[in-house]
Amino acid sequence: MTDIAETKPSIDVRLVPPSERHPRIFGMLNALLPGGSMHIISDHDPRPLHYHLETHFSGLFGWEYLEQGPDLWRVEIARLESAGCDCCCGGAH
């Protein structure tokens, strides 16, 4: 039987240079279909990322801590099912 976590995209940011972390994460988030999710593994609480999502993409992503330190943090971010948005993107985000 396959572990469900193995089928989700994930990124271990401990292995990524700091300047590349958010661009890679947002690239992965943009590729998620509604209802899809990904895991982030970090050596610190990714609170700034959570704040960024809440501020700039409110209502588009869910956030769930799977593990909360002190040495290892794991978060699942889900792209929420959406009825669409009110902007001119055509529901593309």
Image (tube, rainbow, N blue to C red):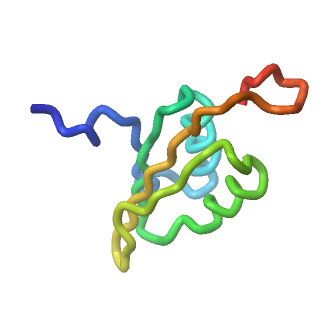
Give 85 or 51, whichever is nearer the viewer: 85
Q: How many marks?
A: 0
Q: Farthest front residue?
A: 83
Q: Is residue 22 above or below residue 27?
A: below
Residue 27, horizontal then vertical, whole percent: 61, 35
Q: Is residue 52 left or right of residue 6?
A: right
Give 34 or 30, whichever is nearer the viewer: 34
Q: In which quarter of the image is the N terminus?
A: top left
Residue in view at x 47 percent, y 33 percent: 36
Residue in view at x 50 percent, y 71 percent: 45
Q: In this view, does 84 lie above or below 52?
A: above
Residue in view at x 46 percent, y 39 percent: 37
Q: Farthest top residue?
A: 90
Q: Is residue 33 left or right of residue 37?
A: right
Residue in view at x 56 percent, y 44 percent: 25
Residue 72, horizontal then vertical, whole percent: 35, 69
Q: Farthest right residue?
A: 88
Q: Is residue 72 left or right of residue 57?
A: left
Q: Quadrant of the C terminus?
A: top right
Residue 40, horizontal then vertical, whole percent: 44, 52
Q: In this view, does 19 lie above or below 36?
A: below
Q: Farthest left residue?
A: 1
Quadrant in which residue 66 is drawn: bottom left
